[in-house]
């Protein structure tokens, strides 16, 4: 896959996921590669002017199909899952375990000893696979380990949380296939760090904070991709 095209798909795919989660408060309920289309608007133009085909991805759109299949997130679902991602960014396995234990209103892992055992197991996972931002965390590997831990400790998770996990696994798979050097957790850092629970914060995030944090993310993405382009050119030379 062309480096610039992969860059557009992965960067905008992560933008879409984070916008749905942090700003719009809903999630595509059937997100998989077959429901993601890439459209080049310039491909439909009969023009011979090379200047009309920008090289920065502005002529390319990432389109989600079956957008009518939507999971609306309750405020606590949004806060719990974002808290889990923030814990991943901080390398905090115990906090991540506490968030996962809130992934169901009818939790089956309720005994204090069972809950502590689960959180301790999450600490062990994070010690090996998730030490936080800037440490090369593989989100897909972490989630696979967490799901196995959930099964082992018989922790219940509700359908909306399962959808959120499946979607981020889809995003991770795209990044691995198209831009393996792009770390989706590190890229999300500017947006995850500004989130706070509560209605006032949600209003501020949607109207003021999110656009600024998104601009910071895109600038960091640009820096990462410029580095990747330089390395690709050096390998060819």
Image (cartoon, helix red, strand yellow):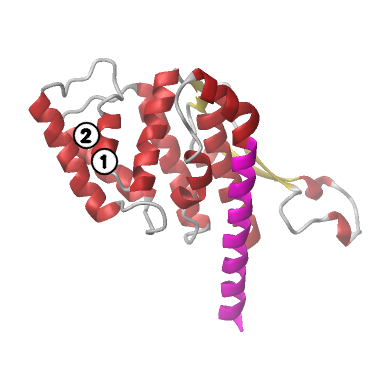
Say few, some or many: other residues with alpha carbon within 10 Å of mark 1 (under 14 / 14 to 19 / 20 or more). some
Q: Nearer the viewer, residue 16 or 120?
A: 120
Q: Nearer the viewer, residue 40 or 164?
A: 164
Task: Tell me where residue 128 appears, x and y as whole percent.
Answer: 23, 55
Residue 86 circle label = none
Label 2: which residue? 150
As drawn, is 235 to the left or to the right of 162?
A: right
Farthest residue, direction left: 113
Q: Secondary structure at mark 2?
A: helix
* Quarter placement of the C terminus: bottom right
Residue at x-position 38% and y-position 35%: 165
Label 1: which residue? 146
Establish if 145 lies above or below 197. below
Question: Residue 23 sits in which quadrant?
Answer: top right
Task: Tell me where residue 30 appears, x and y as whole percent.
Answer: 48, 29
Question: Residue 4 sits in which quadrant?
Answer: bottom right
Task: Tell me where residue 110 appears, x and y as whole percent.
Answer: 15, 21
Residue 153 visible in the snapshot: no
Give the overall secondary structure of the magenta segment. helix
Q: CA distance from mark 1 to mark 2?
A: 6 Å
Q: Which residues are magenta?
A: 211-237
Establish if 55 lies above or below 184. below
Would you say residue 151 sits in the magenta stretch?
no
Question: Residue 207 sits in which quadrant?
Answer: top right
Instruction: Verify CB contact (< 8 Å) between mark 1 and mark 2.
Output: yes
Establish if 227 lies above or below 27. below
As drawn, is 26 to the left or to the right of 135?
A: right
* Quarter placement of the N terminus: bottom right
């Amino acid at each position: 896959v062309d480096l610039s095209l992969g860059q557009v798909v992965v960067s905008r795919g992560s933008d879409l996921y984070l916008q749905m989660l942090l700003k719009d408060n809903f999630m595509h309920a059937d997100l998989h590669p077959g429901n993601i289309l890439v459209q080049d608007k310039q491909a439909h133009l009969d023009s011979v002017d090379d200047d009309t085909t920008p090289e920065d991805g502005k002529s390319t759109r990432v389109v989600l199909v079956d957008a009518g299949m939507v999971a609306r997130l309750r405020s606590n679902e949004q806060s719990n899952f974002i808290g889990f991602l923030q814990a991943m960014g901080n390398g905090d396995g115990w906090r991540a375990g506490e968030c996962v234990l809130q992934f169901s209103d009818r939790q089956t892992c309720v005994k204090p000893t069972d809950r502590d055992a689960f959180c301790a197991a999450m600490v062990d996972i994070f010690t090996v696979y998730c030490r936080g931002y800037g440490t090369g965390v593989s989100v897909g590997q972490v989630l696979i380990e967490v799901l196995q831990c959930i099964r082992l400790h018989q922790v219940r998770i509700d359908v909306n949380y399962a959808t959120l996990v499946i979607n981020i696994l889809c995003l991770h798979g795209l990044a691995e296939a198209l831009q393996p050097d792009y770390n989706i957790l590190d890229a999300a850092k500017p947006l995850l760090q500004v989130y706070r629970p509560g209605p006032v914060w949600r209003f501020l995030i949607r109207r003021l904070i999110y656009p600024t944090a998104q601009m910071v993310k895109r600038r960091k993405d640009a820096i990462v991709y410029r580095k990747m382009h330089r390395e690709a050119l050096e390998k060819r030379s």
